[in-house]
Amino acid sequence: MFSPKRTLRFLLTLGMSISGVLAAAGCGGTSSTGGVQCVYGDHTYDRDERFPADDGCNTCVCGADGRASCTLLACETCDSVLTRYSAAIDEAKTCDPQQTGQCSELITEGLACGCQTFVNAAKSDAIAAASAAQQQYSAMSCGGGVVCGPCRAPTSGFCSSEGRCEQLFEDGDAACKVNGVIYKSGTSGIADPVSCNQCQCQDGQLACTDIGCSVPCPTDTAYGTQCAQCGPTDACDVVEHGCLPTCTDTCEQGVCIDHVCKSVCG
């Protein structure tokens, strides 16, 4: 027979051994180190550990009760990024038809696919916003599986009569510049600079109606054409039509051709 003291000592020793086995086995939903864990998706996180939510936008934290709590931010979708990008690129292409040299910055236009285009260099905020939207669209894996076609590299840009940056290509038709405004080839309804006739731009040349209503050029000027914008191979991308300064032998700017000062390429 055990004495009361020996019996109590035996029971206490037995209880301590059982407690040690239960702790080592991780019973009660604890980790091997005794801490609370949360299962989220295919991953397990420790208590107070922060991790990204499945939507790629919100953030979660593992709570003391073994449950993940996540923020509920209104995350952007692929469509909302597309809308924001479209507004930014539209603003980047706006320009003043009465000013030159605006459409001079070359960027990549597009989200899933992209080709180079000229935009207004003064629209720096819009250009930056378009670039940020492109990066986010890619980070969100939007537009997957799209097969992109080849791109034509533009040679120069100009501001159209509609106030939009357009581009010219090496193998494309030349545009026309009349009264400070550039019209792409094929544009009709252009006012003749020296008459009341209406014209159409055809590869840098003006094809006009033939009404007898001429308007003479100012003194010391004569009607003529010159190159307003040269391409990379010295071809003329934009042909200007209007009253140009007259000359005898030389000009301060350009070359004296047929007694008219003209800008030429090459």
Image: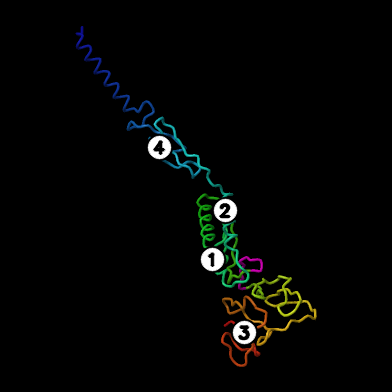
Local crowd size for mark 4, using a 10 Å CA cut-off: few (<14), some (14–19), many (≥20): some
Determine if residue 144 is in view: no
Residue drawn at 32 percent across, 33 percent down? 33
Secondary structure of the residue carrying numbered label 2: helix
Choose mark 4 or mark 2, whichever is in front: 2
**Residue 67 appears in which quarter of the rendering?**
top left
Gap in angstroms between the C-alphas marked 4 and 2: 36 Å
Gap in angstroms between the C-alphas marked 2 and 1: 19 Å
- Quadrant where the C terminus sits is bottom right
Left or right of 239, for residue 232: left
- Where residue 41 appears, x then y in whole percent? 47, 37
- Where residue 259 appears, x then y in whole percent? 65, 90
Residue type at the position of mark 3: Lys
Disc number for residue 122: 1
Gap in angstroms between the C-alphas marked 2 and 3: 44 Å
Disc number for residue 84: 2
Disc number for residue 45: 4
Q: Earlier in the sequence, mark 4 or mark 2?
A: 4
Magenta stretch?
160-170
Q: Earlier in the sequence, mark 1 or mark 3?
A: 1
Secondary structure of the residue carrying numbered label 1: loop
CB under 8 Å between discs 2 and 3: no
**Residue 99 appears in which quarter of the rendering?**
bottom right
For residue 16, above or below residue 110: above
